[in-house]
Structure formats: structure tokens, C-alpha cells
Image (spheres, rainbow, N blue to C red):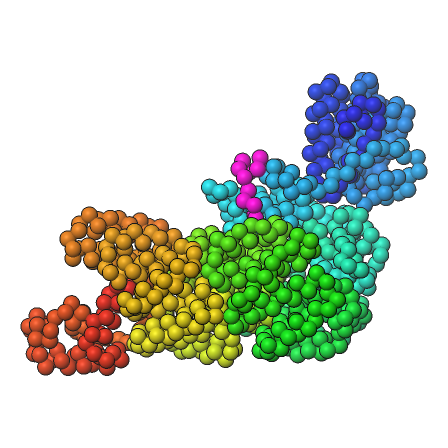
Amino acid sequence: MAESVVRSGGSIDVVGGRFSGRSAFLSALRTRLENHEWNVVSVRGVASLRQHGLAAMHLAGLGGPSDPRLGSTLQTTADALREATRAPRSVLFLDDWDDLDESSWGVAESVRRTTGLPIVLSRLLGLRARHTPSGLTASTLEPSYVIEMVPIRFDELEQVLREHLEGPVETSTMSRIYAKSGGIIGLALSLVDSARRESRLVNTPGGWVAVRDLWTPGLNGVVEGHLENLGQDARDALEIIALVGVADVETVRKLISWETLELLEERAMVELVASGSRQLVSVVPALLVEFFRHQPLAARRIRLTELIMERLGAESPVNVLIANSALSSDVGEGDALFVRLLQERARTRSIVSRVEWTENPKPRTAVQYVHALLQIADGRNFVADVFAKTDSSIGDSSGRAEFVVMRAEWRALVLNDLDGALDDLSSSREGLDDYARVLDATAVRLETMMREVPVDFASLLELDDALPDAVRLVLKETQLLVLITLGRFKDAHRVFASIPERHSTNVSSRANQLFGWVLLGEGAFDDAVQWSSRGLDEAHGLLDADATFNHGYLLALCGVFQGDYAMTHEVLDTLFAIGEPSPLLVHTDVALLCIASVVAFREGNSALGERYLTEAEAVGFVGLNMPGQNPLWPRAQLSAFNGSPQAAAAEMWRAGVLQWKAGGRFSAAVALLTSAEIVVTDEQLDQMKAMLHEVDGEFVHAYLRFLIARHTRDAACLVAEAEALANTGRSGLALNSLKLAIEVASHDQRQDLVDEAEESKAALLLKLGNRGVDTRRFLVSSVTLTEREMEIAQLVATGLANPEIATRLVVSVRTVESHLHRILRKTSLANRAELIAYIRGLESHLPAPGY
């Protein structure tokens, strides 16, 4: 189109934001014209030379004195341009017109008017068509055809990045890049190049994958370029909107002027989106928000936050509570910055949402205000008042449904009144039309989390094509939760695949946070770790505390399964630095305390383990749907630590049976298998085989096959299952399986199996590298046997009688009996048979060399 306009003698304005591809477009157009034997003369504006008349023309070789002692004139420069474009098929290209000096533009415009020379220029969004580069009104400008460089579509960006990176980009990573860049091609390319340099974007057999948050300090310069030519007032306004987050246009108007808001919209730096009867304002692209949040300018943020408070007239106890919040002295520097940013975000959101709710106390504004209050510990004291003062019968159906849902969640999860919450949901359906189905989904979700999976969940969550997209999403997310709870991971994966990509790739969505559990249950452990790690990093960058906790929960638990406590500690340090999660995340809160307690016990720190266990039990919540949400887990670990493995196994078995009866089959399966890992009978193994047939996924079944092979001392199966254990995230148990296989195969004189197990063990150790993994797990104990006591206990485990042991050790039988008495007392074991079972279990869990 542009080529056609030029060839017909017309002029073109190529308009777009920074990094929108204006220069690349001009370059492509120039190539096309030159291929058709056009004479193209190019001049480029230089911002630092705008005060020097004719600077751009002279730098392009047009005009300028041949003798340095002579001065240059407008006439000589204009003559030089006419000469350079004398050929009939000539065109003048002016790139970065906004940075052109006025004299150069005046010469170009004069030549165009006298010769009809077509001009192709690129300029930024924001200036009206009939202005000069410095903004002067110019009524004599010739008309031009405008080509706007709008952000490109998702599929177009995917194609560009595939060529740029010489390979495909994984779908969820592609979605993140598109969301952050807003489809602005230059920003997207800078983003991937920076991420690739810092190994945040890595090439895998499945394509390029983001393994961490994509923001890097190297992007500061790029974004600064995007903000060029933005005055201080406009830049302050943009940062204020970024601090506030998505807000009603009426609220934003109190913070910045209409003129500034219009300018930012013209420059495509803010977007106004209709939401019901409201107009919401947000900063675009999302990369700008991350840029402002990562700026280490505390004084500037304080100034802007104070300005927000002043202009909104916000005087609330909440402000004081947030302003006085302090960080623990043991929080790391990186976590400290993150927590401070969270506090600033919570502060501004609470101020803005309070103003919006006070002026318009409708259900939708109440939900936003309550959500902001939940991010502040003491702010939760105001939640009940918001519920009481909001009329749930006004507003649109969507907003009213959201309000009823949040009120029910508060009643169930915070006030521990599940029945009252379910009654509230049941009695609040009138007038909600299709959105009443959201209340059905909430009832199923709360009952599944707190009591049992409802028997009629399928009918309550049934989908209808006529339902609004928002309602269908909530129903699918609840389906996902229930299917994971039931251990139906194939069905859960199918449901997730049907969720629109804009939600499935959004780390703040419930579906995105749940999918990591699907991957874990299916046995794709590395994928689950990658998914939750990426979610944690991105939620961290977006300052989304709830998503940070939920993704971090799974990642920390994966560290425990793997036996990689360094990873678990790193995640817990970040999450505990934030403080208590929202009370609506009580299940996550309990799980994190349980995880921390178990790791402390396994590392021998009983005091810390008991402290976390006490805190977990004090919360008074036992979750059904996800592993780790039951304080009986660390309680069993404590029993094992105190030398009572039978008690530990019994506690875990009891917890598993109760969870199974309530429909929590995934978490029940993990509890039952953990119990069997400590101590198991033939009857229990048979019972588990029958029960776990109803659960799919390699995570559970690889564990079960290992326990059966260990119980039957099947060396071949132990070797085979070691690989499955490692692939499903249990490297410690895989090493144990290979160690036991070597022992059994040696006893059976199966050298072929010994060699195979040794080879597999060496390969696994090589894969683990320097990363240590725990192989003792529930066999960690505070019991300390002396070297002689351990030697006697091991001889007992081989089946030797006391006289035979005395003969072998050249001691008296009385001495052996004395040692045996002390051993039973230290281990709290009742008899010789229990000691044999204990020692054999201990030997099967002994750490490999270096682990």
C-alpha cells in the first residue's frame, strides 16, 4: 500500500510508538522502491541536535559549506535537496521525524511544495498531523496518507520470534512474551534477547522455554527508550497508574489531569477498558509496570504514594498499619525488596479501592476493597464491616455473584463456618441468572477443600454452551480441582486443555496454579517443577502475593519429594518473608508450615520442627485435596524422629484412610504410600493395590510398585522402578531402590543385576551432580546408637541368636543381652522382631556415599 502511494506521488506518515517497527518498515519500503529503480534520499532526526538548524540535512550530506569559513544558508540546503531528488522517481525518507530540527523540516516541506516531492516520514504517536516536530501549529502542511504501526497479533509475533530464535517458542512462554510486550515487536525482541543472554529463556527439545521471570535489569535501557519524549508530569502520571494498578477512570482522574490521561492514551501507554458500567484504566504494555516496580528509587515511590493519598483524601487506619509495617532483620536483600514492593502495592490498592467503594458501595467495588484488605494482616479487621455495609442486591449479576462468593469464602475459611457459607450460597441465587452457577461451583470447591467431595459434583459443575465465558471458566476451574482431588489426572489435563489460553497461561488464574499438580500427578515431575518455578517467578514479578504463595507451595513440596531441601528452603524463605498469606489461603498456609516442619525434623532441628508443627495445628485446618495440608504428616515425622517408626506409620495410615473416605484420593494415596514406606504388612499392601486402582498417574503408581518390590525383595523390579522413581521426582528413593537391589542381587548371586544396578546408580548420581538429596526421610531419628550397639543390632537383623552374636564378637552373652536391652530402650521398640524390622528398614534407607 505504501509503495503504491509513493509511486502515485503521495506522501506517507508512518506512525507508531517506540519499538513499534517504524524504522524497520521504512527500511523494507526503501528496499522495494530501490528495486524498482527509485532514488531514495534518507534523512534521520537526531534528538541531541534539534537545537542546531539544518543539522539533520547536513549530516545526510545535503547542503553545508564546502569552505568552512563560509556560512551555510537555508537556500543552499534546499538547492542541495532539489539536486539530490532531481530524478523523476525520487522520494525523501525522514526517519524519527519527531527528533528533526525545525529548519531541516522546513526545507523538506518547502521542496515538497515546490516540486511535488513525495515524503515518507516516521513519527511517534501523540502529535497531531498538522504540527511541526517541536509542536508548532502548521496550517500549510500538505496532506499525507497515515499508516499506523499497531501492535502485531499473537500469531504474527510467534512467527517473528520463531525466525529470530531459529526455533519454536513453547506456548505458555509465548503467551507471557506477548502479554509483557503488548505485541510491540521491538519490545518483544529486546525481551527475548535479554532473557536469552541471562539464561532465563532456554532452548529445549520442545522449543524455547522461560525458566524464570523474564524481567532482567538489562531491559531498563530499553524501557527508558520507550518512555522518551515523555514529560515529567506524564511520566509521574504513568508511574502513579502503575502503582495503583487497574482502577476506575474516575479515580484516576483525581490523580492526574484529563490532558495528561489523553496524552498517555494517544501514546498508547494506557488503555481504557469497559467493565460493566465502569471504565478501567491500566498501563500498557505490562513491561512498563514491571519497569516501574523494579526501580530502586524509594524516595520517588514514597513521594508518589504520598501524592496518591493526598489527592484521594485517604485517611484510614489502614494507611497507618501499612506505613508502619516492618521487615524482619533476617530477610534477604532480594526478598526485602520484594516485600517492600508488596507493601507499597497493598498500600496504594487499599487506598484506591477504599475510595472507590466509599463513593460507590456496590458489590463489585466491595470485592476489590476486601481483596486489598486481605493482603494486610490488620486490615482484615475491616472486612466484616465492608460486608455489612454493602447492599448485595444492587449492581450487575456478575459483580453480585463475586460478592456472594467472597462473603461465603470468608465465612467458611476464616470464620470456620462451612455450613453457614453453604447456606448463604444457596439462599443468594435469586436474580443472578446464569451467574448463580458460580455459586454452585463455589459450594463444591469449599466443601471439597474442607469436608468431602460432594457426590453430586458432576451435575453441579455441568457445562452449558449458552453460559457466559466467565461462568464457564469458574466451572472448569472447579472441575479441575475436584478431578485432582480424586486423582483423575488424565481427565484434569483434558479440562485444562479446554480452558482458553489467556486464562491457562495467566499465573494469577486458579487454573494455572492447579495445572502444576496435574503434571505432578501424571508423573511429569520436571515439568511440574518448571511450571511452578516459572509461575513463582512471574507472580513474584507481578507482585501477586496469592499466586506467589500457591505456586511456591507446590515448588516447596516438590523439593521435599525430591529430597532437595536446598530448593525447599529457598522457596520457603521467600514465602515466609512475605508474612501470612491471605486468610482465604488457609490451606496453603497450613501446607507451608507442615513442609517447613517436616524438613526441620529431617535435618535434625527438632525445636524448629516442633515450632512449625505447633503453628500448623493451631490454624485448625486440615485440607483434603492436596498433599501436605495435614499436620499429621509432620506429627508422624516427629514420631519417627523420636524413634517410634511404627507410631509414625500408624498416624500416616490413619490420615490416609480418613482422607480416602472423604474423597481426597490424591492426598490419601500419598499418605498411605508414605505409611507403607515406613512399615507395611501384606494386608496393607493388598488393600492399597485395590484402593489405588481408582487413582491414575505415574506419581502414585511408581511409588506403589517400588514398595511392592522392596517388600518382596525383587531385585529386578527394584532396578526397573528406580528409573520411574527418579522420573517422578523421588531421587532419594531411587538411590535406595538401587542400593537394596544390589544387596538382594548379591545375596542371590545375580551379578548381572548387580552390574545393572551399579550402572544405574552411577548414572543417577552423575545426573544429580553436586545436588544432595535426602535418602533417609522417615528413618531420620534422634536415637543415637553407639558403634557397638549398631553392630549388634545389625547382627540381630541378620537372624543371629545372642550366643551366636557373642561368639562372633568375642564377648559374653550377658554383654550382648545388656547392649540389646539398651538398644530396645533407646529405640522405644518392644521386642526383637520389631528391632529386626526397624534395622532392615533403616538399612534400606541408608544414604548413598556423599548423600
Q: Is residue 364 visible?
A: no
Tell which residue pokes out farthest to the right in this image.
139
> How many numbered circles are shown?
0
Could you say where residue 547 lies in the image, as x and y percent from the top left?
58, 62
In depth, the one of 67 and 174 nearer the eye is 174
Q: Is residue 745 above or below residue 51?
A: below
Name the residue: 84% across, 24% down.
9
Which quadrant would the C terminus be assigned to in this image? bottom left
Q: Is residue 805 visible?
A: yes
Taking depth in this image into account, of 526 and 79 the one nearest to the observer is: 526
Residue 501 shown in magenta: no
Quarter of the figure that contains the N terminus: top right
Q: Position of residue 148 (x, y in %)?
A: 77, 38
Residue 322 point in image, percent of width and height: 66, 73
Task: Please state which of residues 310 and 391 is positioned toward the viewer in this rendering.
Answer: 391
Classify residue 765 as left or right of residue 110.
Answer: left
Residue 824's quadrant in the figure? bottom left
Drawn side of residue 521 relative to residue 340, left or right: left
Q: Position of residue 647 (x, y in %)?
A: 33, 76
Residue 705 appears left or right of 95: left
* Residue plotted at (19% across, 76% down): 832
Residue shown at 74%/39% (left/top)? Answer: 149
537 lies above or below 610: above
Left or right: 392, with 290 as reference point: right
Instruction: Say which residue appears at 65% left-offset and 63% top-offset.
Output: 438
Q: Quadrant of residue 7?
A: top right
> Which residue range is magenta in the image?
162-173
